[in-house]
Amino acid sequence: MVFIISCADEKKVKNNVTDKPTQIEWLSGKYFLKASYGNYYENWEKQDSVTYYGLGYFMDSDNEDTLFRQRMKWVQTPDGTFMYFNVKNQNDNKDVEFRLTNQENNVYTFENPFRDYPSIITYKILSDTTINIKMNGFMKGKEKKEDFVITK
């Protein structure tokens, strides 16, 4: 990977996203959400200074059956910052790309306007141990929203 550094004082900004690398060290760790219908786990590990890999999975309330599983990747490239999701048995098991379109006040908004649901995913850092995740889009012509908090 090649980085080009400029000494110019001017920063290019598009939708509050600068060309400089996003600070995402806060992402590393093991997160958990207990719900009445089961338990969600999300684990993130740093691969290098620009790439983090994650695994998210939902277990039934007895932690016996996996109800949902996804591989995730957060990567910074010269073209932007992206999140990739690969959900088992969906999208022909191919990665789905979301581009960081806004980063402001500890809120990271990723979008893929070509998807129905989710088309927008927002990670909001609430504290050193807590992240609020919101997903928005349309499913079968109806607006769908999910809003949940995961904790280290």
Image (spheres, rainbow, N blue to C red):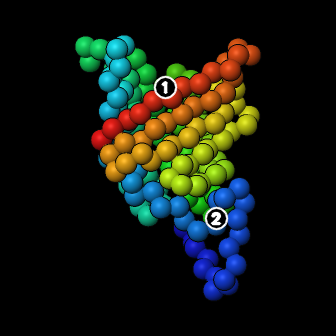
Point out residue 93 in the picture as x, y percentages from the top left corner.
Answer: 55, 29
Q: Is residue 89 left or right of residue 31?
A: right
Relative height, residue 53 to residue 57 (above, below):
below
Residue shown at 45% from the left, 57% from the top:
24
Give percent across and percent down for residue 90: 56, 23
Q: Amino acid at mark 1?
A: Lys
- What residue is rendered at 64% in x and 66% in y? 19
Which SS class for mark 2?
strand
Q: Quadrant of the C terminus?
A: top left
The spot of residue 42 in percent (x, y) is 37, 36
> Residue placed at 58% from the left, 38% from the top?
121
Pick whichever of labels 2 and 1 is earlier in the sequence. Answer: 2
Packing grade of label 1 (10 A; few <14, some 14-19, many >=20) is few
List the residue tagged with mark 1: 88
Position of the N terminus, as image quadrant, is: bottom right
Asked whether residue 92 appears in the rendered view, the answer is no
**Cβ atoms under marks 2 and 1 closer than 8 Å:** no
Q: Which residue is mark 2?
A: 18
Work out how far the residue at label 2 is from the one at label 1, CA to CA, in angstroms. 33 Å
Rendered location of residue 61, percent (x, y)? 29, 14
Q: Could you say whether the residue bearing mark 1 is in a helix, strand or loop?
A: loop
